[in-house]
């Protein structure tokens, strides 16, 4: 599967970021494995340690398996001023995990991220590709419950 | 084209090319700007921020290591503001540093330690934020202690750009940035070739050899063990300055005396097996030349190079000499020939090697290097470990009376001693190959074309009865790649290599620049040590390996002749293909001589 994704792109190192995104998106656990990196390294003819450097530099990539839904709570100053700390505390209690961890049922991974660009609705979080703004502790509970029901 | 510009550093006017950085210009006139991550041998990274200077017209200080000079620039290198900046930077580094100076391997050699001391930094100025992590001690050669790392990036530059091994990288970002191997798999599960250049360039004790000192002391104190020691060529020119002698002092006889005082039962010399290597490898070379072989012969002494070849150039494995390294030849002979001669049970022999090299520790543990029926070499100590041993014993090295080594496997020629410098093996081999083909000695044995620190050196030697022999010498693995890629291309397009015989050494400068050499062994010091070996060569009574009387004797009494059945069994080896991702063996690609 990794090889097929690679072959969609010319074997040029400029394509590294795109290839990594596609590999991660295609993975049911939303991460990039050691084996995947080795395959990409071979295809693009760049050392695996360089890819690992890129992979860990960008927070959107993960080197560890993650849950079905990835929660990214904004930790930038505007959200912080509007109470993102309280939202984070609530999320930790609701999910029973710390930042960077995945729930036992594999449903959620909790992450922090930099500004999502919708400061007018701070505090903000993303779950997968959807934004959730003007968060309150009550609202967060509703959102999480809803996703749990949908599974 | 570089332009000449006028700059003023602390009021001194100087004219320099505009390609220079401020720190280089200041160094030129003897103004020392405090620094930490900068190293003159490596491209600047501007990571630490210690070398800040004030430039007129600039509101904020700039890093001297990565700011180029410009016309009319007025630079101040010392001011109240700069002092505060520098101190703050060092205080922040110390707040995230495992400060264990007295027991640290880099004590008294640590650039952070001396900088903090010079700047009068208060170690408790900032509270410690260090979160201790376990050291990576997976490798047989190198230990990486992140708690002492200051993220200067020198190891990464040297690993990726100078050596092109690509084992280390920066991982994560911001305050979490740290040096790591891919997926934190550890040095042993990376393409690391154990060359140890990272340990030589590390400004602190974050990277050092895996020490085997305790095990060697145990053996020395064990009355049942017969501990025999060999020392590589580079060692004899790397000890003196640690004990107040000039850099590059040639001290083989003080070295023997020190080893005897430490308590080794037999003190011999790797240079002897260097001469032996020349006869084995030279014979192999001449056989290939006579057969009109289109593929080149490449030297096999450097264990960093061997693992690099197994990892990145396994298709050329059949071109690499099957001769074991001088260290491993000594190891196997210490438990066969020597044991037999002395009537000692080889099980009781502990064979110790003192090497300028971290990769030799890995080589010694290769399972296939056990043709004596035992692991041929038991322990490898680096130059740094040996110096520690001398200091621990309280030996006044500079004033030691000269002593001779024990006879049997210690006599050496000038050809053996220059093995320690880049081009030395080639020069030694040419001296003997000429004899092996023509049965006469070269009139002028100085083959200067292969000496010096040029990255790739080429020469052409006329051997009567054979014709022109083209040779190449590369040191530092990025230079090795240049040569090997041309060999690959030559073989693919013309069916032959541009050179008949190639010397490759993993470390820049050859063994005198090895990963086990004293900290701070920069290119200039390597050059000085190399010259010291050529000086020793010039002054030795015998300068060609094939005239070494002890080598002739071992062939007569034990081995028969070069490349004899017994020689092939004991002194030759075979190679493996390794994964470029984790360095592990994937298959055996050449086979042991039958």
Image: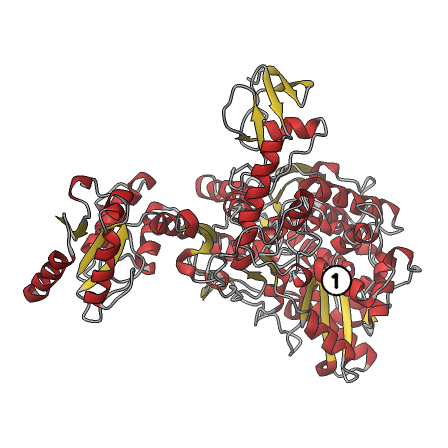
Residue at 62% in and 25% down: B76
**How is the structure coloured here?**
secondary structure
Label 1 lies in what chain?
B
Q: Quick check: can you spot residue A76?
A: yes
Is B219 placed above or below A114 here? below
Q: Which residue is mark 1?
A: B388
Query: Could you tell me residue A36's position as x and y percent?
Result: 30, 57
Query: Could you tell me residue A85's position as x and y percent?
Result: 26, 54
Q: How many neighbours does mark 1 have within 10 angstroms: few (below 14), some (14-19), or many (20 or more)? A: some
Q: Residue furthest right?
A: B401
Horizontal side, residue A120 vs residue B285: left or right: left
Residue B535 figure quarter: top right
Query: Could you tell me residue B559's position as x and y percent?
Result: 74, 69
Is B510 placed above or below B31 here? below
Which quadrant of the rendered structure holds the N terminus of chain B? top right
Q: Quick check: can you spot residue B295?
A: no
Total label count?
1
Residue at 49% in and 42% down: B485
């Amino acid at each position: 599967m990794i090889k097929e994704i690679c072959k969609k792109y010319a074997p040029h190192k400029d394509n590294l970021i795109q290839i990594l995104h596609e590999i991660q998106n295609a993975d049911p656990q939303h991460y990039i494995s050691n084996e995947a990196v080795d395959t990409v390294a071979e295809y693009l003819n760049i050392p695996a340690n360089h890819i690992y450097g890129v992979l860990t530099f960008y927070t959107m990539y993960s080197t560890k398996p993650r849950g079905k839904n990835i929660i990214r709570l904004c930790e930038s100053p505007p959200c912080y001023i509007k109470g993102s700390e309280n939202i984070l505390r609530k999320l930790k209690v609701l999910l029973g995990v710390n930042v960077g961890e995945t729930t036992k049922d594999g449903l959620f991974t909790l992450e922090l991220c930099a500004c999502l660009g919708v400061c007018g609705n701070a505090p903000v979080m993303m779950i997968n590709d959807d934004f959730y703004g003007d968060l309150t502790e009550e609202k967060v509970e509703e959102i999480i419950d809803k996703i749990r029901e949908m599974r | 084209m570089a332009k000449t510009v006028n700059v003023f550093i602390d009021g001194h006017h100087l004219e320099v090319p505009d390609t220079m950085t401020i720190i280089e210009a200041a160094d030129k006139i003897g103004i020392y700007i405090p620094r930490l991550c900068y190293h003159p041998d490596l491209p600047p990274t501007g990571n630490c921020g210690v070398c800040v200077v004030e430039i007129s017209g600039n509101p904020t200080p700039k890093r001297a290591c990565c700011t180029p000079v410009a016309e009319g620039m007025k630079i101040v290198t010392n001011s109240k503001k700069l002092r505060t900046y520098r101190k703050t930077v060092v205080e922040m580094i110390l707040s995230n540093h495992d400060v264990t100076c007295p027991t640290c391997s880099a004590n008294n050699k640590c650039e952070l330690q001396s900088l903090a001391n010079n700047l009068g930094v208060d170690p408790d100025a900032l509270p410690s934020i260090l979160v201790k992590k376990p050291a990576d001690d997976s490798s047989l050669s190198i230990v990486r202690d992140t708690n002492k790392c200051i993220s200067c990036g020198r190891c990464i530059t040297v690993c990726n750009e100078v050596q092109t091994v690509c084992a280390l990288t920066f991982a994560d970002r911001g305050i979490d940035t740290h040096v790591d191997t891919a997926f934190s798999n550890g040095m042993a599960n990376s393409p690391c070739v154990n060359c140890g250049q990272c340990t030589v360039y590390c400004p602190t004790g974050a990277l050092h050899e895996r020490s085997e000192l305790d095990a060697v002391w145990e053996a020395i104190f064990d009355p049942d063990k017969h501990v025999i020691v060999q020392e590589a060529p580079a060692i004899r020119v790397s000890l003196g300055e640690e004990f107040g002698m000039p850099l590059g002092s040639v001290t083989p006889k003080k070295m023997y005396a020190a080893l005897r005082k430490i308590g080794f039962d037999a003190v011999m010399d790797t240079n002897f097996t260097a001469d032996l290597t020349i006869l084995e490898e030279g014979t192999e070379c001449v056989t290939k030349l006579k057969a009109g072989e289109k593929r080149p012969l490449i030297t096999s002494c450097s264990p960093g190079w061997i693992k690099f070849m197994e990892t990145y150039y396994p298709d050329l494995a059949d071109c690499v000499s099957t001769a074991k390294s001088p260290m491993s030849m000594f190891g196997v002979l210490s438990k066969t020939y020597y044991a037999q001669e002395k009537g000692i049970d080889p099980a009781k022999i502990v064979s110790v090697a003192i090497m300028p090299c971290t990769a030799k520790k890995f080589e010694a543990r290769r399972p296939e290097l056990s043709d004596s029926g035992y692991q041929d070499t038991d322990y490898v100590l680096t130059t740094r470990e040996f110096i520690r041993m001398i200091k621990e014993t309280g030996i006044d090295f500079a004033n030691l009376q000269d002593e001779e080594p024990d006879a049997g496997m210690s006599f050496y020629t000038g050809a053996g001693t220059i093995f320690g410098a880049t081009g030395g093996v080639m020069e030694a081999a040419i001296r003997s190959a000429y004899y092996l083909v023509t049965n006469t000695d070269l009139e002028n044995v100085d083959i200067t074309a292969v000496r010096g620190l040029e990255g790739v050196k080429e020469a052409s030697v006329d051997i009567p009865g054979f014709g022109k022999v083209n040779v190449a010498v590369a040191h530092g693995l990025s230079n090795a790649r240049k040569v090997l890629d041309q060999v690959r291309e030559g073989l693919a397009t013309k069916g032959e290599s541009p050179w008949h015989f190639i010397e490759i050494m993993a470390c820049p400068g050859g063994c005198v620049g090895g990963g086990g050499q004293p900290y701070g062994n920069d290119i200039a010091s390597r050059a000085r040590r190399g010259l010291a070996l050529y000086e020793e060569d010039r002054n030795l009574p015998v300068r060609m390996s094939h005239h070494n009387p002890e080598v002739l004797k071992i062939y007569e009494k034990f081995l028969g002749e070069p490349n004899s059945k017994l020689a092939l069994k004991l002194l030759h080896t075979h190679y493996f293909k390794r994964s470029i991702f984790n360095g592990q063996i994937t298959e055996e690609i050449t086979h042991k001589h039958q």
